[in-house]
């Protein structure tokens, strides 16, 4: 691997390198046997004749490896053995990182699956869980991906650059996941204080244990989990009473009975508000879309036309009278007979213009939509027993639109927009009146 070269007159580092075809002069400069002459070699000075210089064997290969412990010079066999050790350590490091990130993402996904399967429980628990869901997952996954890619490619510089940031990112994410889950468990424990050992029973989610012990199915179980948080005295009493009945071996209250009591009590509290809030937020777009469809609006127009509660007959008659007088038409009979079609067109145009905005305002917040959701929940606890808050929100929207609950909302829209309706009526009556006037003249 190394040979000793004895200098001749005029020899410098440059001539030695050229004579022996040495690719890297640093191998000569850094070798410990050349320590005394390294300064002169580096300066390009001529060495005294007969100076002993240790140089790489031109017939062999020398690998220079720089480590934290210093520079090593290895032959080919030694270098291969060295690489085996390095590659093994790289693979071990990546394997450990992969185990850690898989564990963290697995715990994260498992908790989210529980939250999805029992979204109403999660909604109640989230009221008291002050630890937010981890947001650093993407950063951890990206950092791991870079380190893994560098390791597989045996890109030593990139691996050294990325391995420590990946280690820190994964540790941060893992700690956030554990803190989040621990917050959920502690929230579950604080919510239902009677339960002992929730952490051991439901290590992934204390809410699961709480829901199981409380007994009632569907919303009753979900909202009762949040009984202590909700601020609803009725709900809190029912929750602990139910646990007491189960422990004592007596027959629990029927779910329907608990649910009706719950709807009037704890749904006014924070836990119930969380459930209502989720449905309200998710249902809004569905309600707006369904209630502004042509089919629904046609039904509302027909309902409003056939009713007398908005005094539309008087409004129409007054506009017809004014238009007839303005245009000098002899008879109003034809226009009065055409009331349904003319008023129908005007109403349709009005509702098409204002329904979306008015509906969004109505369902976005307020007591009306809260009452509708609470009433809907108390009608059947199975409605919130599904695995998806979005599906529940959609089901509520569909049931709301099918019911007559929106009728007063549309009546209010027409009442508040009477001026706009009169303008539309005037346009439609004028068109019909001009056509009638043409007939009369013919």
Image (cartoon, helix red, strand yellow):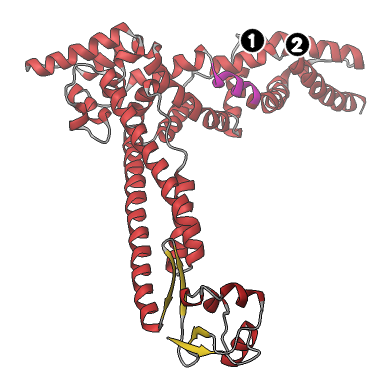
Whole-Å distance between the Cαs marked 2 and 1?
Answer: 13 Å
Q: Residue 336 occupies which quadrant of the picture?
A: top right
In what element is the residue under mark 1?
A: loop
Where is residue 238 drawn, in percent x and y? Answer: 23, 11
Examine the rendering and report whether any part of residue 383 can be seen.
no
What residue is shown at x 42% (from left), y 21% (from top)?
274
In what element is the residue under mark 2?
A: helix
Near-viewer residue (353 or 381): 381
Sooner in the amino-acid sequence: mark 2 or mark 1: 1
Quadrant containing the N terminus is: bottom left
Classify mark 1: residues with Cα within 10 Å, few (<14), some (14-19) or many (20+): some
What residue is shown at x 27% (from left), y 32% (from top)?
205
Which residue was labeled with disc 2?
317
Where is residue 165 drawn, in percent x and y? Answer: 47, 50
- Horizontal side of residue 394 vs 207, given as left or right: right
Near-viewer residue (380 or 431): 380
Q: Residue furthest left?
A: 249
What residue is shown at x 39% (from left), y 36% (from top)?
176
Residue 287 within the magenta-colored segment of the rendering: no
- Horizontal side of residue 293 vs 133, given as left or right: right
Which residue was labeled with disc 1?
310
CB-based contact (under 8 Å), mark 2 and mark 1: no
Q: Dominant secondary structure of the magenta stretch?
A: helix
Write the start and end of the magenta stretch as one range. Answer: 357-365
Quadrant containing the C terminus is: top right
What residue is shown at x 78% (from left), y 21% (from top)?
424
Where is residue 309 drawn, in percent x and y? Answer: 60, 8
């Amino acid at each position: 691997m190394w040979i000793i070269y004895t200098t001749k007159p005029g020899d410098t580092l440059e001539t030695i390198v050229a004579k022996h075809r040495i690719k890297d002069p640093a191998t000569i400069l850094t070798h410990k046997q050349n320590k005394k002459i390294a300064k002169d070699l580096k300066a390009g000075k001529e060495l005294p004749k007969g100076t002993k210089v240790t140089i790489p064997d031109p017939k062999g290969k020398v690998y220079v490896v720089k480590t934290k412990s210093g520079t090593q010079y290895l032959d080919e066999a030694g270098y291969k053995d060295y690489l085996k050790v390095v590659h093994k350590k790289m693979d071990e490091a990546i394997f450990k990182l992969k185990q850690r990130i898989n564990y963290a993402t697995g715990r994260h996904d498992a908790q989210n699956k529980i939250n999805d399967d029992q979204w109403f429980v999660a909604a109640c628990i989230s009221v008291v869980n002050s630890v937010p869901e981890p947001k650093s997952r993407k950063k951890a996954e990206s950092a791991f991906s870079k380190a893994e890619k560098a390791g597989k490619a045996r890109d030593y510089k990139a691996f050294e650059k990325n391995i420590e940031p990946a280690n820190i990112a994964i540790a941060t994410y893992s700690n956030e996941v554990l803190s989040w889950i621990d917050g959920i468990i502690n929230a579950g424990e604080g919510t239902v204080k009677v339960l002992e050992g929730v952490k051991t029973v439901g290590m992934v989610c204390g809410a699961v244990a709480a829901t199981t012990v409380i007994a009632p199915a569907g919303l009753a179980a979900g909202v009762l989990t949040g009984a202590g948080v909700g601020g609803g005295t009725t709900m809190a009493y029912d929750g602990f009473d139910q646990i007491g009945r189960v422990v004592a071996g007596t027959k629990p209250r029927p779910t329907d009975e608990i649910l009706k009591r719950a709807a009037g009590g704890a749904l006014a509290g924070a836990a119930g508000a969380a459930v209502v809030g989720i449905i309200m937020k998710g249902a809004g777009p569905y309600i707006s879309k369904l209630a502004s469809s042509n089919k629904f609006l046609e039904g509302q127009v027909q309902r409003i036309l056939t009713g007398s509660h908005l005094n539309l007959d008087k409004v129409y008659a007054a506009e017809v009278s004014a238009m007839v007088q303005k245009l000098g038409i002899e008879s109003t009979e034809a226009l009065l007979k055409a009331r349904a079609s003319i008023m129908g067109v005007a109403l349709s145009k009005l509702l098409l213009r204002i329904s979306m905005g008015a509906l969004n305002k109505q369902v976005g917040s307020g007591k009306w939509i809260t009452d509708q959701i609470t009433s809907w929940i108390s009608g059947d606890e199975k409605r919130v027993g599904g695995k998806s808050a979005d599906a529940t929100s959609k089901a509520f929207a569909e049931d709301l639109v099918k019911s007559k609950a929106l009728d007063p909302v549309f009546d209010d829209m027409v009442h508040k927009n009477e001026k706009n309706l009169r303008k539309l009526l005037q346009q439609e009556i004028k068109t019909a009146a001009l056509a009638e006037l043409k007939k009369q003249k013919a």
